[in-house]
Image (cartoon, grey):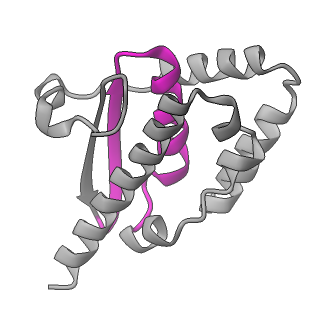
Amino acid sequence: MTLNEVQDRIIEDFSIFEDWMDKYQQLIELGKDLPPIDDKKRTESYLIKGCQSKVWLDAELENGKILFSADSDAIITKGIVALLIQVLNQRTPKEIIDADLYFIDKIGLKENLSPTRSNGLVAMVKQMKLYAIAYQAKENR
């Protein structure tokens, strides 16, 4: 599935919920399905700066594609990072760098988050793109 096909599927999945409480519940469920991050990566160096809750994010390059793993101590935040991983996982660095993450606005995520969670969302996207930039630079050497 292409990056945009995954985003379109997420938009479709969230469109069945009219109430934001139901959408939050969907985020919580997505967070529960997120595979746990390696305990060795639950350290300060993997924490995303700019998130009110703790979010650990790691990325590894395998066969030219980035594999993300993450965790959070907050259930909704964990669901948000799980959504981002659904879209960006197993993509090339270039795909991640060039990605227009339109699903965030289409499902109303940004406007229905508290300002601190919204800042955290921006910080998560930024960190994922920074990993992609770093791996792309490494590949181009």
Q: Position of residue 117 (x, y in %)?
A: 50, 30
Compared to 2, does 58 lie above or below? Answer: above
Left or right of 24: which side holds 50? left
Quadrant of image for the C terminus = bottom left
Left or right of 79: which side holds 74? left
Residue drawn at point x = 37 percent, y = 26 percent: 52
Q: Position of residue 75 (x, y in %)?
A: 48, 15
Kindly indicate the quadrant of the structure image that contains residue 133: bottom left
Residue drawn at point x = 57 percent, y = 17 percent: 28
Q: Position of residue 127 (x, y in %)?
A: 33, 51
Residue drawn at point x = 38 percent, y = 60 percent: 129
Q: Position of residue 33 (x, y in %)?
A: 50, 22
Compared to 62, does 15 lie above or below? Answer: above
Left or right of 91: which side holds 17? right
Kindly indicate the quadrant of the structure image that contains residue 96: bottom left
Work out whether residue 89 or residue 84 is closer to the camera in this orientation and state it: 84
Left or right of 115: which side holds 71? left
Work out whether residue 50 or residue 109 is closer to the camera in this orientation and state it: 50
Question: Which segment did they paint magenta?
Answer: 63-92
